[in-house]
Image: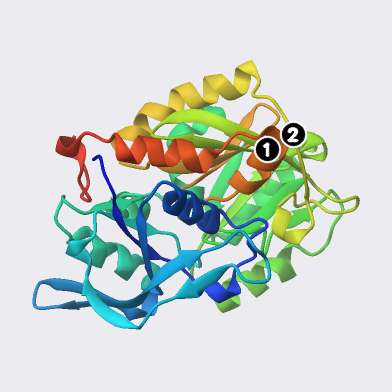
Amino acid sequence: MSGQLNIAIQMDPVSSIDIGGDTTYALALKAQERGHKLWYYTPDRLSYQQGRITAIGQDLTLFDDRDHFFETGAIEERALEDFDVILMRQDPPFDMAYITATHILEMLPPTTKVINNPAEVRNAPEKLLVTLFADLMPATLISRDIEKIRAFRDQYKDIIVKPLFGNGGAGVFRLQPGDQNLSALLEMFFKVSRDPVMVQQYLPDVRAGDKRVILINGEAKGAINRVPQEGEARSNLHVGGSAQAIELTDRDKEICAIIGPELKKRGLVFVGIDVIGNYLTEINVTSPTGIREIERFTGQSMAALFWEAVENWPEEQWTNTVPRR
């Protein structure tokens, strides 16, 4: 689609973001620079009524200035089918509210492109989509069966335990051989949630970094390395990991070549994968981050590449529903 695009962004409150590292802000700012119009709303203002999908939101103008980085217009209700593009960019938790939003956005006509495809976002939470590529992953168990988890720990000794629908490194634990906290940890997880947990073999290569690779329309476009702090098992930037410039290895390119066609087929246009050593650990499709850091180290704008892909998307391929297989 060529020309000026009317873009609505479904996101967390704009006042709450840190523009130094926020990918949604970077995508929106680049869209504005390319002459597109921005409007934004929060997920709680999304509604369905008698076949009509609306939201209450505001025009949005952005500035690359920490002290004054946005202005909003008058609050108004608009039909989302009047927009060319909807960016679904609110952060997890991937709970029933998030899932309900994907169902509502899926009802929009194909003339309004929702990115990422909401049906596939619903079908592909990051720690589950990756299991389609088990041969690329470290040893992994998804379960809430305590005996299965103990047996996995007995086999692999040094393990990572994390919530299945978490994000940003929250609730991620490393249990080394001899650690006596597994039972208490599982009790805590299972008391607050009915979800299974993901348990993986600990990869010592994480000390050298957890690589975030950005794929746009199924193709690898850039990467950043995230190195955990000393004494910390998590490398997420939200919890103190440091960003470093890095090049894609042959193994990284191999992983991207394997998973890329599946991502493209599903309409997952903007994706961030996590690679530790030779292993794929997550495929992030809800609100992947990292492009501000990539641009800071390399000068390469992932946001520009993203909008080029959207602007040149063949109209006959625009769909918000699960593709027929």
The residue located at (66%, 20%) in the rendering is 249
**Residue, x 59% and y 78% (percent of image)?**
191
Q: Which amino acid does label 1 sit on?
A: Ile
Q: Can you name the residue that lies furthest to the top here?
A: 250
Place of residue 260 in the rendered image (x, y in percent of width and height, measured from the top left): 42, 29
80 vs 164: above or below: below
Q: Quadrant of residue 278?
A: top right
Residue 22, quarter of the rendered image: bottom right
**Tag shown at residue 224:** 1
Residue 49: % across, % down? 14, 79
Q: In which quarter of the image is residue 218?
A: top left
Locate residue 86 relative to residue 278 in the image: left or right.
left
Label 2 belongs to which residue?
245
User: Label 2 near label 1: C-beta < 8 Å?
Assistant: yes
Observer-nearest of 220 and 20: 20
Give the mark nearest the N terminus, 1 or 2. 1
Indicate the quadrant containing the N terminus: top left, top right, bottom left or bottom right.
Answer: top left
- Amino acid type of disc 2? Ala
Q: Can residue 287 be seen in this view?
A: no
Callout 2: SS? loop
Relative to the observer, which residue lies in front, 168 or 7? 7
Residue 33 drawn above or below residue 298: below
**In the displayed structure image, the side of residue 90 where residue 244 appears, left or right:** right
**Quadrant of the frame with the C terminus:** top left
Dot 1: element: strand
